[in-house]
Image (cartoon, rainbow, N blue to C red):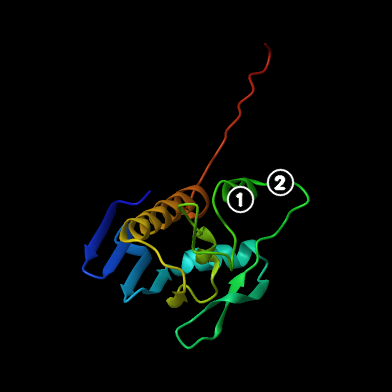
């Protein structure tokens, strides 16, 4: 679980960082000027690698999300498994629709974390208009989701079971 969390609002910027054992796992920055909103996201490579593996490396090109140069972003496709698994169930609890609104019914679109190249940092523009309160909530929701994702699926876990059988009972 994250050891420290810092969220600041500085004039036009809202920045959120999650730290785990000194490593920054996730950074989101929202900059709104004159109604234009630019979202910058950067995640630790373990997060991008997690989604890449979950998608079996399959990427798609978004027709909606574009970078600062108006180039479409690529994203890791979520798999629909024949048998439900814990990741499907986990993602089903969140707004996870790549290419749809970044915020819908006050819910942050966590699919943004599936963007290819997020470990290098990505920027995307949104044409939708959001209040400062909504943008703060967006940052906090992505922050919480990333911490939960890391704690639930990415952090190292080692489990051992030992069974001893007594003879003669």
Q: Where is residue 59 in the image (x, y as percent from the top left)?
A: 65, 73
Residue 8 falls in image quadrant: bottom left
The reply, left or right, for residue 13 in relation to residue 150 is left
Q: Which residue matches tag 1?
A: 87
Residue 56 falls in image quadrant: bottom right
Residue at horizontal 32 percent and vertical 72 percent from the top: 31
The local crowd at label 2, few if under 14, some if 14 to 19, many if 20 or more residues have their Cα within 10 Å, is few
* Quarter of the figure that contains the C terminus: top right
Above or below residue 164? Residue 102 is: below
31 and 105: which is toward the camera = 105
Residue at horizontal 45 percent and vertical 49 percent from the top: 148
Q: Where is residue 14 in the image (x, y as percent from the top left)?
A: 29, 65
Residue 163 falls in image quadrant: top right
The reply, left or right, for residue 135 in relation to residue 111 is left
Whole-number angstrom distance, CA of label 2 to CA of label 1: 8 Å
The local crowd at label 1, few if under 14, some if 14 to 19, many if 20 or more residues have their Cα within 10 Å, is some
SS at circle 1: helix
The number of numbered discs placed on residues in the rendered structure image is 2
SS at circle 2: loop
Q: Which residue matches tag 2?
A: 84
42 and 68: which is toward the camera = 68
Residue at horizontal 61 percent and vertical 50 percent from the top: 87
As drawn, the residue found furthest toward the top would be: 169
């Amino acid at each position: 679980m994250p050891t420290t969390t810092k969220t600041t609002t500085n004039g036009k910027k809202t920045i959120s960082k999650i730290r785990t054992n000194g490593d920054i796992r996730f950074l989101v920055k929202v900059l709104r000027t004159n109604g234009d909103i630019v979202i910058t996201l950067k995640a630790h490579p373990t997060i991008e690698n997690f989604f890449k593996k979950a998608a079996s490396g399959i990427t798609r090109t978004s027709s909606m999300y574009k970078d600062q140069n108006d180039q479409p972003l690529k994203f890791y496709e979520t798999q629909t498994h024949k048998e439900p698994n814990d990741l499907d169930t986990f993602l089903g609890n969140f707004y996870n629709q790549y290419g749809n609104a970044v915020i819908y019914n006050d819910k942050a679109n966590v699919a943004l974390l599936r963007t290819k190249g997020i470990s290098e940092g990505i920027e995307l523009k949104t044409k939708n208009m959001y209040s400062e309160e909504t943008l703060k909530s967006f940052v906090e929701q992505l922050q919480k989701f990333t911490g939960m994702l890391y704690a639930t699926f990415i952090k190292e876990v080692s489990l051992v079971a030992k069974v001893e059988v007594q003879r003669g009972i």
